Image (cartoon, helix red, strand yellow):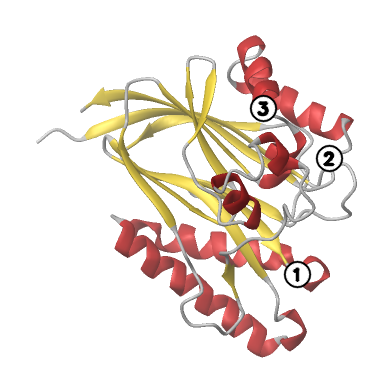
Amino acid sequence: MHTIKQRIEASFFTNKGGTRSNNEDGLLVLNTLISNLSMKIPESFHGDVTHAIFCVADGIGGEQKGEVASQVILTHLRDHFSEITDEETFSSVAYGAKEQLEMYVEKYPEASNLGCTLAGLIIHDDKALIFNIGDCRVYRINGKFFERITKDHSVVQHLLEEGVITEDEMRYHPRKNIVTSSISGDGIKDSIHVWFKSISLRDQDLFFICSDGIWECFSQDELEMIFEKYPGYAFCEKVLVAALARQASDNVTAILLSTTQSQS
């Protein structure tokens, strides 16, 4: 039986943004974990994979160590991602990550609110399992159009579905930062709700994974306009520069990912 390899090209960055003093976001590209760092320029990855993870995490807890939460969760995902084959095994690894946070809170009770939201995709042969917990997002880029695949766990997502606000109004709403699911050291047993979608990868598929700092800073139209003019690595470069020029009020993290099939 043929193993289906995907030729991956990825560009990625994480930065504290325009106003925050520290970066509580982090990202995972295969085994590369970047956390508690403010990158000046994006980095890139090129290579063939059969099983790989790409994930963005956004720490919750502010002064209560949001960056610790995203680092703990991403480290756990990296170390256990070979166990993930489907939704059930992903959930089991997510709860394992939650246990790590609970242990941290036992040691440091003042950090009881720490947690993180995350979104990304796991590639396995010619399939991708797309996931999110909270309000980080995964978009699939069709031509020039950014199609949001994931569904936020948030108050504003609920308002959008009720027809109370538009997609663009989510970016400015006073309750935009209230999430209804996260991996947190909150001592609540079944507090993680994961949104999943399993898809077949098409040749030359393109995905954009980002923290809420990005989609709050740029409308979908703006992202599409930048992408049309600057595809590939240049897109990440322009988005990072523009986010800092706009004094992005949150940390900003993104991964742009293209997949091309090659059989072996």
Which of 137 and 47 lies nearest the eye of the viewer? 137
Whole-angstrom CA distance, mark 1 to mark 3, is 27 Å
* For residue 151, above or below residue 226: below
215 relative position to 261: left or right = right
Residue 9 placed where, x, y %?
48, 27
Q: Quadrant of residue 11?
A: top right
Quadrant holding the C terminus? top left
Q: Which residue is mark 3?
A: 236
Q: Which residue is mark 2?
A: 248
Residue 134 placed where, x, y %?
58, 57
Quadrant holding the N terminus? top left
Compare marks 1 and 2 and give the one earlier in the sequence.
Answer: 1
User: What's the residue type where badge 1 is placed?
Assistant: Lys
Compare marks 3 and 2 and give the one earlier in the sequence.
Answer: 3
* For residue 240, above or below residue 176: above
Q: Which residue is mark 1?
A: 65
Q: Quadrant of residue 63?
A: bottom right
